[in-house]
Image (cartoon, rainbow, N blue to C red):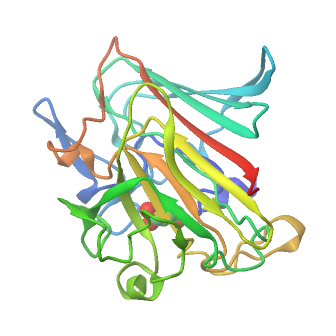
């Protein structure tokens, strides 16, 4: 029940379209679609009742030396304004290397934009009791998407060089966060990942020196949203009574670029009938040796 009231997307599958769609509308094949506007005049994370609020059906899976669970949800035609009935499955599998692999599959009966993302928050030190600003992070990206004051991409790709977004070499997450407070409250930006393809490749690595814990994120997606928990304000209380405060957790959300339906120059996020949407993300935990 608390998840249905929660607006922070804790551990959620975000969809039908993760991140923002400008003005809550887009045009596809000559038709204009109007989506729920749930962040000012914009559409965020699939709308007022996005996939994070859907009740999914789950079944256990066991294959080889992996165990997991597969969730299924059928999003009706017109849900939150999107065209077509979308049949979605999300599989979570634990492997022996400390990896949690998430595989997304979807099919549709009408062309629709699809962008499914995983929205877990991480704190490698304290389960959320302390800030993550001293975690060291490396991101496999040379460019990020320039955004306006609402977090909507302008369409421009900019080099990270000389900006607070430069994590090409490992740096403390908070090294220049103060430069971003006025605009977005911290990190809330999309990185253009260097490589992508059939198999998940390394997108980011985060370490906590005090505990030696390490998180690696691998994905097939073109973008990675770094979000530093800017909107956490202490009102959410999680495990062991820990209240989640600003910058006490980070998210690394592998996804297509925000507002893709309004940017023909971005990699397409349209799924056509007869096609299968397929993306994967792996969160692999380990220790620094
Ligand atoms: C994403 C968005 C943020 C925020 C968080 C959840 O990272 O880009 O602006 O919505 O999800 O609060």
Q: Residue at x 47, y 47 (%)?
A: 254
In the image: residue 5, left or right of residue 268: right
In the image: residue 105, left or right of residue 67: left
Residue 155: percent from left, percent from top = 17, 57
In the image: residue 225, left or right of residue 32: right
Q: Is residue 57 depicted above or below 54 in this figure?
A: above
In the image: residue 272, left or right of residue 230: left
Res. 38 in view:
yes
Q: Quadrant of residue 270?
A: top left
Res. 49 in view:
no
Q: Residue at x 76, y 27 (%)?
A: 68
Q: Quadrant of the C terminus?
A: bottom right
Q: Nearer the viewer, residue 267 or 160?
A: 160
Q: Nearer the viewer, residue 102 or 76?
A: 102
Residue 273: percent from left, percent from top = 32, 15
Q: Is residue 29 depicted above or below 184 in this figure?
A: above
Q: Residue at x 30, y 35 (%)?
A: 269
Residue 44: percent from left, percent from top = 40, 57
Q: Nearer the viewer, residue 36 or 185?
A: 185
């Amino acid at each position: 029940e608390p998840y249905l009231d929660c607006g922070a997307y804790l551990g959620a599958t975000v969809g039908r379209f993760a991140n923002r769609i400008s003005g809550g509308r887009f045009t596809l094949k000559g038709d204009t679609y109007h989506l729920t506007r749930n962040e000012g005049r914009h559409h965020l994370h699939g709308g007022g009742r996005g996939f994070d609020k859907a009740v999914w059906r789950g079944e256990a899976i066991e294959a080889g030396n992996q165990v997991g669970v597969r969730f299924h949800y059928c999003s009706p035609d017109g849900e939150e304004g999107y065209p077509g009935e979308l049949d979605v499955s999300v599989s979570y599998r634990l492997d022996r290397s400390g990896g949690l692999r998430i595989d997304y599959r979807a099919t549709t009966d009408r062309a629709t934009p699809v962008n499914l993302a995983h929205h877990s928050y991480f704190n490698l030190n304290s389960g959320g009791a302390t800030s993550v600003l001293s975690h060291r992070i490396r991101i496999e990206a040379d460019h990020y998407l320039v955004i306006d004051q609402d977090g909507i991409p302008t369409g421009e790709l900019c080099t990270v060089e000389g900006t607070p977004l430069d994590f090409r070499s490992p740096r403390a997450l908070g090294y220049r966060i103060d430069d971003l407070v006025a605009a977005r409250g911290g990190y809330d930006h999309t990185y253009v990942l260097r490589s992508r393809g059939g198999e998940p490749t390394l997108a980011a690595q985060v370490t906590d020196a005090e505990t030696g814990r390490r998180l690696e994120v691998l994905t097939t997606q073109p973008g990675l949203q770094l979000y530093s928990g800017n909107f956490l304000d202490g009102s959410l209380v999680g495990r062991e009574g820990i209240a989640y405060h600003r910058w006490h957790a980070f998210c690394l959300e592998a996804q297509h670029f925000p507002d893709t339906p309004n940017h023909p120059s971005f990699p397409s996020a349209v799924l056509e009938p007869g096609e299968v949407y397929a993306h994967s993300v792996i969160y692999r935990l380990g220790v620094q040796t």
